[in-house]
Image: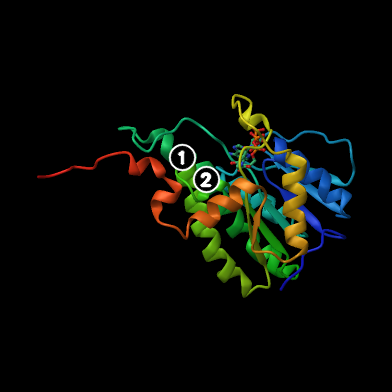
Amino acid sequence: MTSINLKDSVVLVTGANGGLGIEFVHQALSLGAVKVYATARTPRDWGDERIVSLQLDVNDPASVAAAATTASDVTVVINNAGISTGASLSDTDLTATRAIFETNFFGPLDVANAFAPVLAANGGGALLNVLSVLSWIGIGDAYSATKAALWSATNTQRLALAANGTLVTSLHLGYTDTPMTVGVDAEKNDPADVVAAAYAGLAAGEFEVLADELSRQVKAGLAAPVTALYPQLLEVSLGATA
Ligand SMILES: NC(=O)c1ccc[n+]([C@@H]2O[C@H](COP(=O)([O-])OP(=O)(O)OC[C@H]3O[C@@H](n4cnc5c(N)ncnc54)[C@H](OP(=O)(O)O)[C@@H]3O)[C@@H](O)[C@H]2O)c1
């Protein structure tokens, strides 16, 4: 088991200006990281010499490649950037669905591929993909599909990057109190708790971090018949024939 302690690490966070991103940056430093690359579409001044602000748009392969060249000392990559939109798999015009896949699936894939050789060169390190409980339950429409697709990719990466000594960990969480969920009226996790669970998972060498009870319940439900996660299926009558 590869244990990844943040002490003396060099961390790179995508989407660092967001709710979880800010927590990933600050908690990395609290845990002893010597440097954090806080990457964003629009970098800002963090007022801390340990934080290096870097431009990185996950939809722009040139900016991802440039960041991988600049941040050649990285040992932990936090693939955090993501969007939640109203994109629907049922739309006749799938432009919005393709757009959310660009940011939530192809973007993190590009980041992982660009940084895999960097992590390998620096001893292995870790890649943390920020997924969701919706990797396992399709109630978020196109958004869920992006997180399910990235979960599949993450499983492939776990095996592929193990050869480099890189720990690939997925983070699964339900509603968390960040700008992404401002319009959501529901109980939400504290982003500080989610990030603390994620870094504790890396320290324990976990391949998967289930940050809340909902994520644990839904993951457990995968082993049951599909109607356990989708009980509404029991209420509908499907194409009854005489
Ligand atoms: N909050 C939740 O309930 C929840 C639940 C499950 C999973 N998640 C996942 O957690 C991650 C972080 O989300 P959050 O809750 O912290 O939301 P957030 O506050 O909206 O932060 C998302 C960040 O991603 C950045 N981003 C969006 N598109 C990008 C791109 N093309 N390139 C680089 N950065 C980009 C945004 O940058 P700008 O500042 O430039 O807009 C923003 O800073 C996401 O992957 C999300 O899907 C969140």
Say what secondary structure mark 1 lies in. Answer: loop
Quarter holding ligand 1: top right
Q: Which mark is residue 134?
A: 2
Task: Specify the quadrant of the image occupied by residue 48.
Answer: top right
Tell whether 238 sits left or right of 216: left
Q: CA distance from mark 1 to mark 2?
A: 7 Å
Q: Residues within 10 Å of mark 1 (few under 14, many from 20)?
A: few
Quarter of the figure that contains the C terminus:
top left
Quarter of the figure that contains the N terminus:
bottom right
Q: Nearer the viewer, residue 217 or 57?
A: 217
Q: Nearer the viewer, residue 68 or 8?
A: 8
Q: Position of residue 16 (x, y in %)?
A: 72, 40
Q: Are marks 1 and 2 in contact (CB under 8 Å)?
A: yes
Q: Position of residue 138 (x, y in %)?
A: 45, 44
Residue at label 1? 139
Task: Specify the quadrant of the image occupied by residue 60.
Answer: top right
